[in-house]
Image (cartoon, rainbow, N blue to C red):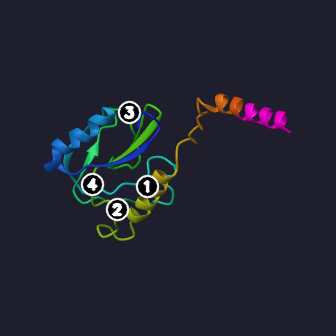
Amino acid sequence: FISGGGKALFIGENDTWTNWNNSILSVVSGGGSYLCSWDSGTPSVANSLTDGVDTVAPACASKLDAAAGNPTILFSNAVAGLYSYGAGQAVFVMDSNLFDNSFIVNGSNAKFAQNLAGWLATPLAPAPVPLPAGLPLMLVGVAGLAALRKKKA
């Protein structure tokens, strides 16, 4: 799905979910350090995923390895990253609690969640409309019907 041009969101967790983290990150040859980090992070890049986000704060998150799978690390705490895979993209978030503001005062976790929803809803590129294989044959048929009708008239 992703390599064909789709987008996906994967959610990892802290050190008690190492097998889970390894399995989802293997989709894009990614990796991480599975510990329990409460470090807040600020945007590392400016894009639609980080737009309007000042600070994100996890609750016991793992961190992505910037060298494994070549992600664009979205925040300075390495709790989220954007991976390109084939014609598609995937975002990996390494804390299931990152989508609300209950863990940080004046944080932007909820804004990051809104940005993710908008990103998922926007296709990377419009899909080409395929030309049906039977279209030329259908046109020949319509032309034949028109010729018969003209002959009868």
The stretch drawn in magenta includes residue 7: no
Q: CA distance from mark 2 to mark 1?
A: 10 Å
Q: Decide: is 149 above or below 100.
A: above
- Which residue is tagged 3? 70
Quadrant where the N terminus is found in the figure: top left
Drawn side of residue 21 relative to residue 80, left or right: left
Q: Closer to the observer: label 3 or label 1?
A: 1
Q: Decide: is 80 above or below 143.
A: below
Q: Quadrant of residue 89?
A: top left
Q: Closer to the observer: label 3 or label 2?
A: 2
- Which residue is tagged 4? 95
Disc nearer the start of the sequence (1/4): 4
Answer whether residue 148 is visible to the viewer in this image.
yes
Magenta part of the chain: 142-153
Q: Measured from the top left, where is residue 106 in percent x and y? A: 39, 70
* Callout 1 amino acid: Leu
Q: CA distance from mark 1 to mark 4?
A: 14 Å
Disc nearer the start of the sequence (3/2): 3
* Callout 3 amino acid: Asn
* Callout 2 amino acid: Phe
Q: Measured from the top left, where is residue 132 in percent x and y? A: 59, 33
Q: CA distance from mark 3 to mark 2?
A: 24 Å
- Crowding near the residue tagged with mark 1, few <14, some 14–19, many ≥20 C-alpha atoms within 10 Å: some
Answer whether residue 49 is visible to the viewer in this image.
no
Q: Decide: is 62 above or below 137.
A: below
Name the residue located 21 percent from the left edge and 56 percent from the top edge.
60
Q: Measured from the top left, where is residue 71 in percent x and y? A: 39, 37
Numbered tag placed on residue 99 in the rendering: 2
Q: Are marks 3 and 2 in contact (CB under 8 Å)?
A: no
Name the residue located 34 percent from the left edge and 62 percent from the top edge.
99
Disc nearer the start of the sequence (3/1): 3
